[in-house]
Image (cartoon, helix red, strand yellow):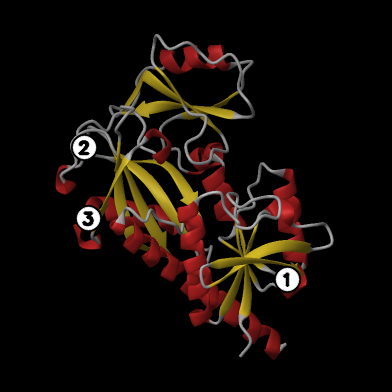
Amino acid sequence: MHPKTVLLIDLLAYETLTANPYNNINRNYAYAHFVNRAADFGLQVWITHFNNISDDGSFFYWTAVDDNWVAGTNNLNNVQVAYAEVPPHEPRAMDVRALLMASGVTIINDPRLLDIATDKMLSYELFPEHIPFTIAVNENNLEEQVRYMRSLENLDDDLSGRVLFLKPRFGLMGDGIYILEHDTPLPERLEGEYILQLFLESGNGIPELGIEGRHDLRLFIHNGKIVQFKARLPKNNPYVCNRNHKGISKYYNLDDCPKFIADFAIQVDKSFAHMYPRLYSMDIGISENGNPRIYEFNTMPGLSWKETDPESKIRAKEIQGIVLNMLAEVAHKQIAAQAVI
């Protein structure tokens, strides 16, 4: 049987034709492993960036043969499934979405889930009871909105205007985040749309997991089930745990997930039950009064690891397997349905 074709559209892939798809040696190695594994699922995987796809549906791509990357060209008409980062704030990405749909390509994750995960303002509007109070800002009204946020009274016990988070509305990998304490100068320029968000104090940690102090718990959810979770803990910055700020990651076994956290995540996931299949992550913190709150959602979990971190390699390979099963299910069902028609 001829393998079904998956086009992996990745924001981190190069936008010009080079020897390798990525500028990171660990990522190149890990994604080559993913591409080679795909053959066991009856799939062939091509990797590109949305800017590499032309209006006529033609594109160049990379695929792996063992540990070597080779390039090629093809057309969307020969693709069954796109595992795609085509974010809503990028006009060209939206053009590519339309091209994929016109070519009969199934997009995973569902673009509606991609939009929710990408747009932090939309996330808040959908889950205002679970996400710290958030407003949209720009460089013209920032000072006024900061004053407004700091004037709020009768806040929930777990929220504080003492510290405000200023983040890109459509953020990626923690870039462009400002932590505004009372004496922090406001940035003079903001590139693009931003949000201003109240600070969630999570300083009591999660005793059930042995976590002391502030944290960011990332739950990976696949079709209504938690399949993996880890804690990200601050190192250099007392407020930010992400990789760009040298945050420390600690993985846990699924059985270790406290019931109140698992129940919260699965209840929230029910809002996405009409989007199938789905694999995304939910970042949460436990407030000082013990309530889970959502920081943000993320779609398309990373498939790479650091060779110097054996645990991350094991966990990334687990996620790779889930992604490949999901893609294979959709690709083979799509072919079967076309055969019946």
Q: Give the Cα distance between marks 3 and 1.
A: 41 Å
Q: Secondary structure at mark 2?
A: loop
Question: In the image, what residue occupies the spot 23% across and 30% down?
Answer: 203
For this view, does 306 lie left or right of residue 27? Answer: left
Q: Residues within 10 Å of mark 2 (few under 14, many from 20)?
A: many
Quadrant location, the C terminus = bottom right
Quadrant location, the N terminus = bottom right
Residue 104: image tag: 1
Specify the amino acid type for callout 1.
Answer: Gly
Q: Give the Cα distance between marks 2 and 1.
A: 47 Å
Question: Residue 300 placed where, x, y %?
Answer: 51, 56
Specify the amino acid type for callout 2.
Answer: Gly
Q: Quadrant of residue 98?
A: bottom right
Question: In the image, what residue occupies the spot 64% across and 29% down?
Answer: 192
Specify the amino acid type for callout 3.
Answer: Lys
Q: Quadrant of residue 108?
A: bottom right
Q: Mark 3 sits on what residue?
A: 259
The answer to whether marks 3 and 1 mark residues whose Cβ atoms lie closer than 8 Å is: no
Residue 31: image tag: none
Question: Residue 224 placed where, x, y %?
Answer: 40, 63
Residue 324, relative to residue 279: is it above or below?
below
Residue 76, relative to residue 263: is it above or below?
below
Label 3 or label 1, whichever comes before in sequence order: 1
Residue 205: image tag: 2
